[in-house]
Amino acid sequence: MSLTVYPIEYLILKSDITGDLEGRVEVPYFFGSKSEPTTLLLNAYISKDVENFLSEWYDNSLNLPLLEEDIKPIIEAVIESQVGYLSSSFVSFYMDYFSFQTYQAHPMTVRKTYNYDLCRNKFVSIYDILGDNTKESRKIIIDTINSEIKSNSEFYFNTKIDTLDYYQDYYIFEDNLVIVFQLYEIAPYVSGIREFSFPLDKLGIQLSNEGVKH
């Protein structure tokens, strides 16, 4: 049985049933792996993240003061996802957690990435996927990012990347490893979420139904 993913828009948030919280939720649902409990656990991780995000913003909605008499403030939560790589042993995707409330200066989005080894039943860090090539590949990634920052300084803070954090956000998309920097992490809000793509073969990474190879 091959691994399959379906996008599920399982919840539409409307103010008449959720108080002041509005929005929508669309998440991937995985099934059909060689080890069914593994996909069930991955789906449970996703569901827990969604629950925590919605609970936080629902609680926030209960504490917002009225704008004027009987005029309630707006609070919106949206979750969308994009699957970049899917095999029977490894999946890579991200989920955008968008939020906005009346008293914020602007909306905020967190792009959380998920890279999951279905054979080992664990999340795969950036260092795990780089494997034996970590030192060389890390230098390629850091040098490329710093070169982009220097060449297009108007889009970035005056900063320099010295290392890759163990928990660095990344995902796989169309034979590329995409490094993700969140809003305000290396650039101002107007520059958006910053992403840098690197061909897998340039980093010495091979993906197959057996998982990650180096």
Image (cartoon, grey):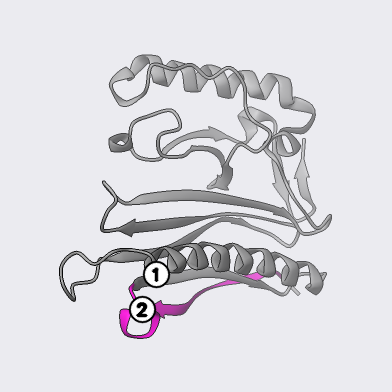
The furthest residue to the left: 68
Relative vertical location of residue 192 with respect to residue 164 in this rendering, above or below: below
Q: Quadrant of residue 205?
A: top right
Q: Which residue, given by chain and number where applicable, does mark 1 sit on?
A: 62
Q: Amino acid at mark 1?
A: Leu
Q: Which residue, given by chain and number where applicable, does mark 2 sit on?
A: 19
Q: Amino acid at mark 2?
A: Gly
Foreground residue among 47 and 83 = 47
Residue at 57%, 49% (x, y): give it. Answer: 113
Is residue 107 in the magenta section?
no
Question: Do callouts 2 and 1 mark residues in contact (Cβ within 8 Å)?
Answer: yes
The magenta stretch is 2-20
Counting from the top left corner in percent of width and height, residue 17 is at: 37, 85
* Quadrant of the snapshot with the N terminus: bottom right
Relative vertical location of residue 132 with respect to residue 20 in this rendering, above or below: above
Query: Regarding mark 1 in the picture, which secondary structure is present there?
Result: helix
